[in-house]
Amino acid sequence: GIDEALERFKPDCIVAQGDTTTVMSAAIAAFYRHVPFVHVEAGLRTGNLQAPWPEEFNRRVASIVTALHCAPTGRAADNLRAEHVDPATIHVTGNTVIDALLWTVARERDASRGWAEKYAFLSDNRVVLITGHRRENFGGGFEEMCGAIAELAGQFADVRFVYPVHLNPNVQKPVHEILGQLGNVHLLEPCPYPEFVWLMDRSTLILTDSGGVQEEAPSLHKPILVMRETTERPEALDAGAVELVGTSRERIVGSVTRLLTDADEYSRRQIEVNPYGDGQSARRIVDLMTQQGWSS
C-alpha cells in the first residue's frame, strides 16, 4: 500500500493529480508521514458534496493537507483562497491533461492511419462521440441519456453515434438494452487513450459526463455537451465551448439537434484558446518543486 511505499522509499514529497479516492488516500498518507503533498489539479469545486460524488469530498480533503497547490486556472486558485488556503502555496500552472493531449496528438500522427482503417465504418459521416460513467447518473439518469441518444439516432440517420462503454454493469445494462440494436450507434469496448484522442479529433461534437474530456476537447475545437447539472470546470462553459444539458432527454436532444443543424451556433462553440492549459504545465510544476528542493 501507500504507507509501505513511503516507508521504503522515503520520498521528499508525494505528487498526485485529480480527485479520485486514491488521491485523497495519498494526501492522508502524506500527512501521517509528515511528507509534503503536491496536488495537481487543485482548487476545482462545485460547492456540492454530492455532485460529483465522491470527487468533491476527495479534493476538499486533499486540499487541507496540501503543501503545494497546482491550480489549473485562476478561478481554481480563487476557490482555494476563498477557503483561506495560504496564498503562498497556490500557483496557477495549467493542467497536465493538456500536456498529455498535445503530446499524444503530435506523437500519434503516424498511427492515425491505422485508426482511420479500423473506423472505416464512420466513412465521411458526422460523428457524435459519447462517454458516460458518473455514479450520480446511474439508474434513471442513464436511461434518460440513452433514450435521448436513441431519439437522435432515429432523427439523424446519417450521423454516427460512437460510444466506448464503461465496463461498470450500471452503465453496460441500460446502454446495451436501449442502444444495442440501433444501426448508426456503435458501442465499443473502452479504448486506449491515444485511440480515444483520435476519436475526439474525428468527432463533430462530444456528449459526455467526464471531467477530463471537458478540458481536452476545447484544444481540438470541439463543442462539448455535458450531461451533468453542475461542473467544477466553468471556464470552458464561460468561453462557450461547453453547455450543461443534464440528463434530461429533452435538453440533450434539443442541444445536439441545434449543433447538428445550425452552422453558426456550431462555429460559435469552437473556441481558439483552451483555458485549461498550453502544454507547459508539467514544466511549471517541476520548476515549483525544484524551488522547494523536492526535485533535481
Image (spheres, helix red, strand yellow):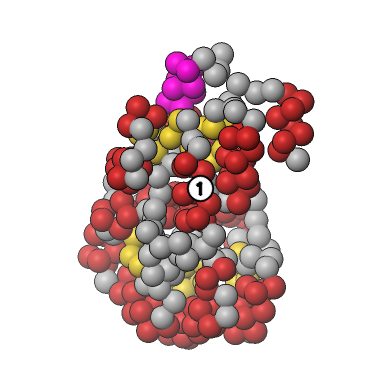
* Residue at horizontal 49 percent and vertical 22 percent from the top: 289
Give the number of callouts: 1
The quarter of the image holding the N terminus is top right
Foreground of the two, 233 or 158: 233
Q: Position of residue 120 (x, y in %)?
A: 60, 62
Q: Position of residue 8 (x, y in %)?
A: 77, 25
Relative placement, left or right, of 67 versus 83 is right
Res 154 seen here: yes
Q: Quadrant of residue 242?
A: bottom left
* Residue at horizontal 60 percent and vertical 51 percent from the top: 21
Answer few, some or many: residues within 10 Å of disc 1's Cα (few below 14, many 20 plus, some between 14 and 19). Answer: some
Residue 196 lies, with reference to residue 31, above or below; the image says below
The quarter of the image holding the C terminus is top right
Relative placement, left or right, of 184 versus 93 is right
Residue 69 lies, with reference to residue 236, above or below; the image says above
**Main SS, magenta residues:** helix
Magenta stretch contains residue 287: yes
Q: Position of residue 273 (x, y in %)?
A: 30, 43
Res 280 seen here: no
Foreground of the two, 115 or 240: 240
Report the residue marked by disc 1.
Answer: 61
Residue 125 lies, with reference to residue 75, above or below; the image says below
Residue type pointed to by label 1 = Val
* Residue at horizontal 60 percent and vertical 28 percent from the top: 34
* Residue at horizontal 32 percent and vertical 55 percent from the top: 234
Q: Position of residue 261 (x, y in %)?
A: 31, 74
- Label 1: which secondary element: helix
Magenta stretch contains residue 127: no
Q: Quadrant of residue 95?
A: top left
Range of the magenta residues? 283-292
Residue 138 lies, with reference to residue 66, above or below; the image says below
